[in-house]
Image (spheres, helix red, strand yellow):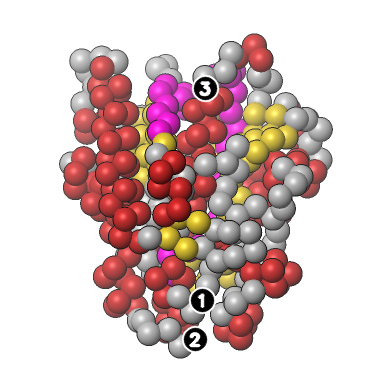
């Protein structure tokens, strides 16, 4: 499976740490940065709406939002299409998934395809924050002849709409952002997916939840421990596969992009895996936790940056509990 392009979109409205203090939360920039390392995050919600309501009614948030999931997904997809030099008529399938879809039915992928004018099968595959990894795992395992030449994978994440802005433990984390990836099972692109990992522990299903018409909740300490453990294991499994492919490969040649839950979690994974700073990439400090779109938006923002190197391991975790990994390598010239 080849990755031809990534795209991203973050709404223009920014929630600063000062804003969270301004609306009456018992917090400040020092408290937030020390605990989660996040300074800003984006939102589809108007700041006046958050200030006046604290988002007590998530149904009202759907009405107040400046963008729908379909629109933010469309904008991310247009960037990916432009980078790949493709048009909507080239897309033979649309796959989507994330943490907080706009509707139960139709599939989020159908709404995105409709917004783009794509006529192709459109289905959802959700694994919460690990959706992108799960989607690539399943696509990579399918017989190429059963897939079209180009597949659009979109993760529209606008979860600030389900955040309780009177709960400082959750509202300091979440930001909105959407990612889009253009994949092909047979046509070579700038990146090749050489290995994927997918795991799950459904006994932890209650640890991270967004009920229908309800707010996001999680068992913070337990989830943090789980995320560090599984992200570390996933990265090490991907690194082992990477190193086994040839004696010329070294650990220093592999970059880490983890699940953008919070910077302190990522730093713990970095320490455990001994990844040098120059090979650890993140945007959670500026974007917040953007769910399933977090890791792919990091690589999308660095799409033209040579510092990324020739091999990247994405290690992501999510509600379920679930975890997934993707090894991306530039094809040999």
Is label 1 or label 2 in front? 1
Asked if the residue under mark 3 is in contact with the one under mark 1, i.e. CB atoms within 8 Å, the reply is no
Labels 1 & 2 near each other (Cβ < 8 A): yes
**SS at mark 3 in the image:** helix
Q: Residues within 10 Å of mark 1 (few under 14, many from 20)?
A: many
- Residue 134, given in percent of the width and then of the height, sits at 50, 34
In depth, the one of 204 and 24 nearer the eye is 204
Query: For mark 1, what is the residue?
Result: 165
Q: Residues within 10 Å of mark 2 (few under 14, many from 20)?
A: some
The rendered magenta stretch, by its main secondary structure, is classed as strand
Q: Quadrant of residue 161?
A: bottom right
Q: Is residue 283 above or below residue 54?
A: above
Q: Is residue 23 visible?
A: yes
Q: Which mark is residue 180?
A: none
Per the image, is 223 magenta? Answer: no
Q: Is residue 279 visible?
A: no
Q: Which mark is drawn over residue 140?
A: 3
Mark 3 and mark 2 lie on one chain; the one further toward the N terminus is 2
Residue 186 is one of the magenta-drawn residues: yes
Q: Residue furthest front?
A: 203
- Part of the protein shown in magenta: 172-199
In the rendered image, the vertical position of residue 244 relative to residue 92, given as above or below: above
Q: Earlier in the sequence, mark 1 or mark 2?
A: 2
- On the image, the x and y values in percent for residue 149 come to 67, 20
**First of labels 1, 3 by sequence position:** 3
Q: Mark 2 — residue? A: 23
Q: Nearer the viewer, residue 189 or 268?
A: 268
242 lies left or right of 100: left
Q: How many marks?
A: 3
Q: What separation in Å lies between label 1 and label 2 (alpha carbons)?
A: 9 Å
């Amino acid at each position: 499976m080849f990755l031809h392009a990534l795209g991203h979109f973050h709404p223009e409205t920014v929630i600063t740490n000062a804003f969270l203090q301004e609306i009456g939360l018992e917090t400040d920039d020092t408290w937030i940065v020390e605990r989660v390392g996040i300074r800003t995050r984006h939102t589809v919600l108007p700041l006046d709406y958050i200030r006046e309501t604290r988002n007590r009614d998530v149904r009202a948030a759907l009405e107040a939002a400046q963008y729908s999931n379909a629109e933010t997904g469309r904008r991310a997809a247009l960037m990916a299409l432009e980078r790949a030099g493709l048009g909507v008529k080239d897309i033979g399938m649309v796959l989507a998934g994330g943490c907080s879809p706009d509707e139960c039915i139709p599939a989020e992928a159908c709404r995105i395809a409709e917004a783009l004018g794509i006529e192709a099968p459109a289905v959802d595959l959700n694994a919460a924050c690990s959706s992108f990894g799960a989607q690539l795992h399943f696509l990579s395992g399918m017989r190429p002849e059963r897939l079209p030449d180009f597949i659009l994978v979109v993760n529209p994440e606008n979860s600030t709409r389900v955040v309780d802005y009177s709960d400082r433990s959750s509202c300091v984390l979440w930001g909105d952002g959407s990612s889009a990836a253009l994949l092909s099972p047979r046509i070579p692109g700038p990146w090749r997916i050489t290995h994927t990992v997918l795991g799950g522990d459904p006994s932890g299903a209650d640890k991270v939840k967004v009920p229908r018409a309800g707010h996001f909740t999680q068992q913070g300490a337990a989830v943090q421990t789980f995320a560090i453990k599984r992200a570390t294991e996933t990265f090490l499994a991907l690194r082992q596969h990477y190193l086994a492919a040839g004696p010329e490969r070294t650990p220093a040649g592999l970059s880490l992009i983890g699940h953008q839950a919070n910077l302190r979690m990522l730093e713990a994974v970095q320490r455990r895996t001994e990844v040098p700073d120059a090979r650890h990439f993140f945007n959670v400090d500026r974007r917040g936790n953007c769910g399933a779109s977090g890791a792919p938006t990091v690589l999308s923002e660095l799409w033209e940056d040579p510092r990324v190197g020739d091999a990247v391991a994405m290690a992501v975790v999510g509600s379920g509990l679930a975890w997934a990994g993707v090894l991306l390598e530039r094809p040999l010239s």
